[in-house]
Image (cartoon, rainbow, N blue to C red):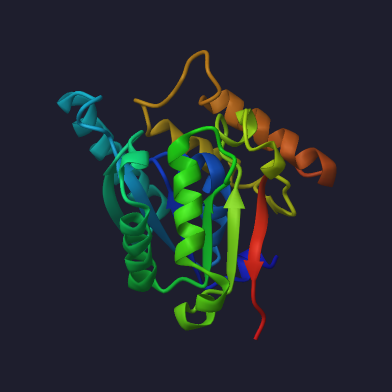
Amino acid sequence: MVLLNSKKILIVAPHADDETLGAGGLLIRAKKMGIKIYWLLITSPNKNIFSREYINKHEIQIKKVKKFYGFSGLHKLHYPSADLEQISKAKIINSIQEGIKKYEPDTIILPHIADAHSDHYITHVCCMAACKIFKLNSMGLKKIYSMEVLSETDIFTSKKDYQFQPNTWVDISNSLNDKITAFKFYKTEIQKDGPRSPERIKHQAQYNGVPLGWKAAERFCLLNSIED
């Protein structure tokens, strides 16, 4: 229960829906336990790629998801999605640090370094740079985890030396349905024939729970931890 012993959890999502795919069940459990949860959203839909209609729908979906989880705060950086490679890493790092200082979490959850999407990789690298081990005490941080995002963490083709190796399992047997409900708010992101669907979210969670005899689980990797 180390992860759920936190007082404030900040989930760092490259895109809206990553927070749900990676840690929706955990967030539901944390909120019910009285842990404050916060959301740092790195990108917004790229105006050069998406229509105004899509962007408007996407914003409505985010508001619904924020309310559903009961986030105590949402901080948006508004970098263009699929274009983080064009942004200075120093700029991204500084803006992530601002978000951390704003909410003062003791636990951060971020995407895995080997996720297939470049936005995920860059978010991970910049988060870790913003939270160097010698800075943790002054920032009030105690634990940093990476999460497993369906359709990104499981299909990496490069960085094989950085394969996701979970060392923390969280029982989401009683929060899986809420996780799926949260994802259903993202009507623009649901794939009928792809991995991002309510049915496949359920299957992944059930698979993750098998080794422990749980009905469903989410998996995380503890990256850094300090004990006073």
Image position of 90 (left or right of 192): left
State whether residue 109 is above or below residue 191: below
Note whether 197 is above or below 68 in the view shown. Answer: above
Q: Determine the residue located farthest toward the bottom in the rendered image.
A: 228
Which quadrant of the figure has residue 103?
bottom left
User: As drawn, is 9 to the left or to the right of 205?
Assistant: left
- Camera sees residue 31: no
Left or right of 16 on screen, residue 213 = right
Query: Where does the C terminus fall, quadrant-wise?
Result: bottom right
Residue sitting farthest toward the top: 193
Residue farthest to the left, as pictured: 52
Measured as percent of width and height from the top left, residue 143 is found at: 59, 68
Relative to residue 164, is residue 140 depicted above or below?
below
Query: At which x and y percent is residue 27?
Result: 52, 54
Q: Which residue: 24% across, 25% down?
A: 50
176 or 85: nearer the viewer: 85
Could you tell me residue 199's position as x and y percent?
58, 24
Residue at x 53%, y 27% (from the top left corner): 198
Compared to residue 155, the image places residue 10 above or below, namely: below
Q: Residue at x 70, y 65 (%)?
A: 1
Pinpoint residue 48: horizontal percent, then vertical percent. Answer: 21, 27
The foreground one among 65 and 151 is 151
